[in-house]
Image (cartoon, rainbow, N blue to C red):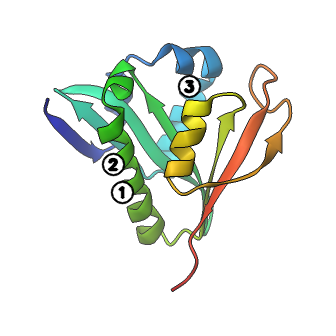
């Protein structure tokens, strides 16, 4: 397998076949997410054998604070160890480069695999958001704080 990570470009969006999870939970919101990514990066694209495995990045909300996100294809699932290690490495790079003292993300309640992922990334559970999702699902808020040295 040949792996590569590059800065996200809008044309990468058209190259991915999203997993069923993304299509089911995000549906029509995927294009709105793309617009936020284009305007508020930074983001990266992971390729496996020349195909888009997934994207990850941080949407900067205001100075010092960002919203982390990950979207993937089936290649994400079958290469998840490689992808997750790189997401952790790039998250640290993004937080340092963009001087972020906080990155937060939400995870749909009940998705234990995604909960393990965000905890591996160093995020801590902060609370439950009731009826937060596009279809009224509960989500869990996680945050990672970068303390000044």
Q: Crowdedness of circle 3 by 10 Å Cα count: few (<14), some, many (20+)?
A: some
Mark drawn on residue 89: 1
- Left of 75 or right of it: where is 97? right
Residue 105, placed above or below residue 99: above
Q: What residue is drawn where x is 33% and y is 48%?
A: 86
State if disc 1 and disc 3 touch (CB < 8 Å): no
The image position of residue 44, as x and y in percent, is 36, 45
- Left of 89 or right of it: where is 71? right
Q: How many marks?
A: 3
The image position of residue 12, as x and y in percent, is 32, 30
User: Where does label 2 land, which residue?
Assistant: 86
Res 133 visible: yes
Mark drawn on residue 30: 3
For this rendering, which residue is in front, 81 or 139? Answer: 81
Q: Quadrant of residue 32?
A: top right
State if disc 1 and disc 2 touch (CB < 8 Å): yes
Question: Distance of mark 2 from mark 1, alpha carbons?
Answer: 5 Å
- Left of 87 or right of it: where is 99? right
């Amino acid at each position: 397998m040949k792996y590569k990570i590059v800065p996200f470009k809008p044309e990468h969006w058209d190259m991915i076949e999203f997993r069923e999870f993304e299509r089911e939970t995000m549906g029509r919101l995927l294009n709105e997410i793309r617009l936020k990514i284009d305007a508020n990066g930074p983001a990266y694209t992971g390729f496996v054998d020349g195909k888009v495995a997934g994207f990850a990045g941080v949407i900067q909300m205001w100075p010092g604070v960002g919203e982390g996100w990950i979207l993937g294809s089936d290649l994400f699932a079958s290469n998840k160890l490689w992808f997750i290690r790189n997401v952790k490495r790039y998250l640290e790079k993004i937080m340092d480069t963009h001087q972020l003292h906080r990155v937060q993300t939400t995870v749909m309640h009940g998705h234990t695999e995604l909960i393990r992922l965000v905890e591996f990334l160093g995020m801590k559970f902060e609370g439950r958001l009731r009826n937060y999702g596009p279809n009224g699902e509960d989500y869990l808020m996680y945050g990672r704080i970068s303390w000044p040295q």
